[in-house]
Image: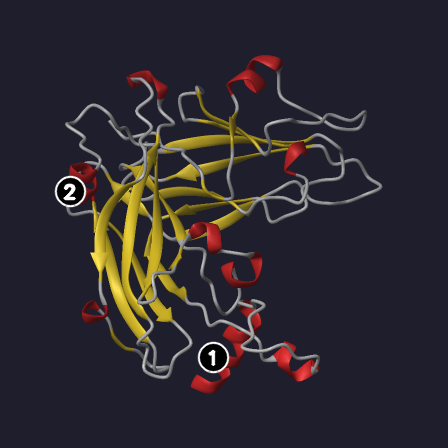
């Protein structure tokens, strides 16, 4: 198994280095530098209750550095930042700051012979790191954690190192995670509107909405040549619900996607768009210009949608 890992790493991190010139094909094939990743085994909680300092983002991480004894890496730095999506209290978006540093001593060998650890980032520590005193954040703001893997030779791998080949699949190594600041949600009927600017539906599974772990996908189906440019539905949130999350899968044509949510009282609580520059074709549909002006850019992942119970 470990030899397989080493061969996989050889295919990921290729450089042109040689002790002497050679025209042999095999020299080019074997000419590589071993890299390292932080593999995401699981994210067990990606919502943080801003009313509870012990509430935490939870994950299981595994370090894979291409050596038999996992001796190449020296530490992991976890940084945190907050994106302010609740402008009523001003824009309190932060820079990225160091939250924790973990070393090999914090990890144990896991079932596949690689260092593994269950990690947590609790709200009390996050508030202290971001120097929050109380009024700078609100449910609906988004936390982003960025992991940087330091090697003994001075190299560092982080979010900028995460090429497509390692962000998904087996390696699952994005080096970056989102967590939504949330609260106990308001109960009642939420109304959702979905728009496609071309008219051929969304090219993805759309938005996943989860109520205490029970999830469903909301999307505009692809029924071309039938025009499908709009969809609406309702979501019933029972009284006593603890967690309500909305997660966008992204879309091949994000510049055609609008996603709008109205709360139980009929007020719009979220307007999102899939790209900075949106397109509208003759068969497409879009919300009113007023709603378009309020729409924020959606990134794939958790959406900053939160309406608190009173």
Question: In the rendered view of the protein, which quadrant contains the C terminus?
Answer: top left
Q: Which of marks 1 and 2 is nearer the N terminus?
A: 1
Q: Nearer the viewer, residue 181 or 96?
A: 96
The residue nearer to you, when weighing 262 against 82, is: 82
Q: Quadrant of the N terminus?
A: bottom left
Residue drawn at the location 51% of the way across and 44% of the way down: 300
The reply, left or right, for residue 184 in relation to residue 194 is left
Q: Quarter of the image holding residue 130?
A: top left
Lateral position of residue 274 relative to residue 145, left or right: right
Work out whether 156 lies above or below 198: below
The residue positioned 31% from the left and 45% from the top of the image is 47
Q: Is residue 242 visible?
A: no
Instruction: State the image quarter where residue 221 is shown.
Output: top right
Q: Residue 5 carries which label?
A: 1
Rendering coords of residue 84 (x, y %): 35, 28
Q: Position of residue 209 (x, y in %)?
A: 46, 44
Image side of residue 194 versus residue 213, left or right? right
| Residue depth check, mark 1 versus mark 2: number of the one nearer the observer | 1
- Residue at the farthest right position: 225
Q: Residues within 10 Å of mark 2 (few under 14, many from 20)?
A: some
Left or right, 162 with reference to 134: right
Residue 287 picture location, percent across and down:
62, 21
Report the residue marked by disc 2: 124
Q: Do the residues labelled 1 and 2 touch (CB within 8 Å)?
A: no
């Amino acid at each position: 198994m470990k030899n397989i890992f080493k061969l996989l790493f050889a295919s990921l991190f290729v450089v042109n280095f040689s002790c002497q010139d050679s025209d042999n094909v095999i020299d080019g094939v074997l000419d590589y530098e071993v890299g390292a990743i932080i593999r995401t085994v699981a994210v067990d909680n990606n919502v943080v209750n801003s009313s509870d300092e012990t509430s935490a983002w939870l994950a299981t991480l595994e370090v894979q550095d291409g050596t038999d004894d996992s001796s190449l890496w020296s530490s992991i730095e976890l940084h945190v930042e907050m994106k302010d999506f609740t402008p009523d209290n001003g824009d309190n978006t932060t820079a990225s700051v160091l939250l924790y540093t973990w070393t090999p001593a914090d990890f144990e060998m896991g079932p596949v012979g690689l260092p593994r650890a269950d990690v947590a980032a609790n709200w009390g520590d996050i508030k202290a790191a971001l120097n929050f005193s109380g009024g700078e954040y609100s449910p609906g703001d988004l936390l982003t954690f960025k992991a940087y893997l330091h090697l003994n030779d001075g190299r560092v791998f982080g979010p900028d190192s995460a090429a497509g080949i390692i962000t998904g699949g087996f390696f699952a190594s994005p080096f970056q995670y989102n967590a939504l600041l949330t609260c106990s949600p308001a109960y009642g009927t939420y109304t959702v509107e979905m728009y496609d600017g071309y008219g051929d539906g969304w090219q993805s599974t759309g938005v996943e909405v989860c109520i205490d772990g029970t999830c469903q996908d909301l999307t505009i189906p692809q029924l071309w040549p039938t025009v499908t440019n709009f969809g609406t539905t309702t979501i019933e949130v029972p009284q006593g619900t603890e967690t309500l999350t909305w997660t966008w899968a992204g879309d091949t044509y994000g510049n055609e996607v609008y996603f709008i949510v109205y709360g139980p009282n009929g007020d719009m609580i979220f307007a999102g768009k899939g790209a900075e520059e949106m397109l509208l074709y003759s068969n497409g549909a879009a919300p009113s210009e007023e709603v378009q002006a309020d729409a924020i850019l959606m990134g794939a992942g958790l959406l900053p949608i939160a309406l608190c119970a009173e």
